[in-house]
Image (tube, helix red, strand yellow):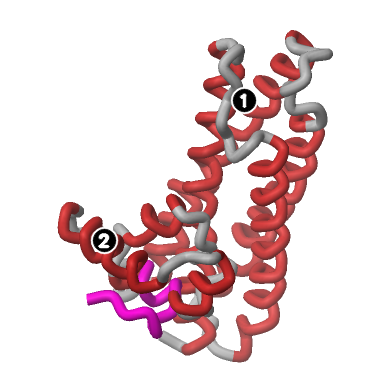
């Protein structure tokens, strides 16, 4: 049973279905994973007990996921690269191109997301640099068995950059009206917003796995 004194990160680790609930209510379980459910809900103006019940209800309908908190860290780094990094490299450039088309074709309309393509391009530059650091520096260190103090500083750098990614997601949500297309949106516009919503969900899960599982275990010496 979920309690309101558990942290969001711990809840997401033990009840992965909770991540859907956190996304539904815009509770930050990745960069904000160290906050308790009670604290996070208080900040968001939500009823923590109701959210806990929703998590337990959602978990009761879900399957059993892979337990990354006990599997080898080498396997987890490989999963992050093959699943999350590759998906970003495949999806984000296409989203940038879709944003360019939408801004061009619908220029002058009151609800067009002006500046979205530029914002996405900046976000993508940051993500490419971030993933390169992980793939060429931090992940190889972890695969070679580095733990504790030897990975503490590079982990902290990655966590600070994760906070910047969270801020980027917040700006994207604000510019797009929480990814809700207007009634007059064309098919490309709707697909763009659907893709951005998927990007947010995937990136939050990605950052959660790194901050609250991979990095935590590496620094702790698991």
Q: Residue at x 67, y 51 (%)?
A: 170
* Coordinates of residue 134 in the picture (x, y in percent): 62, 61
User: Residue 94, which numbered label?
Assistant: 1
Q: Residue at x 61, y 90 (%)?
A: 149
The stretch of residues the image draws in magenta is: 1-12
Residue 71 seen in render: no
Q: Quadrant of residue 150?
A: bottom right
Q: Is residue 6 magenta?
A: yes
Circle 2 Cα neighbour tier, 10 Å, few/some/many (<14 / 14–19 / ≥20):
few
* Coordinates of residue 31 in the picture (x, y in percent): 59, 68
Q: Name the residue nearer the viewer: 210 or 20.
A: 20
Q: Name the residue nearer the viewer: 115 or 178.
A: 178
Q: Name the residue nearer the viewer: 152 or 140.
A: 152
Secondary element at image label 1: helix
Circle 2 is placed at which residue position?
A: 66
Report whether 13 appears left or right of 137.
left
Q: Is residue 198 magenta?
A: no
């Amino acid at each position: 049973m979920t309690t309101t004194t558990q942290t969001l990160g711990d809840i997401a680790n033990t009840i992965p279905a909770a991540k859907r609930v956190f996304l539904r209510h815009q509770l930050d379980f990745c960069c904000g994973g160290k906050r308790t459910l009670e604290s996070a809900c208080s900040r968001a103006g939500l009823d923590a007990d109701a959210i806990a019940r929703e998590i337990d209800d959602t978990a009761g309908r879900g399957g059993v996921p892979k337990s990354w908190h006990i599997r080898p860290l080498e396997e987890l780094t490989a999963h992050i690269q093959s699943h999350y990094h590759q998906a970003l490299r495949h999806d984000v450039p296409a989203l940038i191109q879709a944003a360019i088309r939408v801004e061009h074709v619908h220029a002058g309309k009151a609800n067009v997301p002006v500046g979205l393509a530029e914002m996405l391009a900046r976000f993508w530059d940051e993500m490419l640099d971030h993933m390169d650091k992980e793939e060429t520096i931090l992940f190889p260190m972890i695969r070679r068995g580095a733990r504790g103090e030897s990975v503490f500083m590079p982990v902290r750098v990655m966590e600070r950059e994760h906070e910047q990614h969270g801020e980027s997601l917040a700006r994207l949500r604000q510019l797009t009206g929480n990814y809700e297309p207007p009634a007059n949106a064309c098919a490309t516009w709707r697909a763009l917003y659907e893709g951005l919503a998927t990007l947010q969900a995937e990136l939050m899960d990605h950052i959660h796995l790194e901050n609250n599982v991979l990095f935590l275990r590496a620094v702790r010496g698991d």
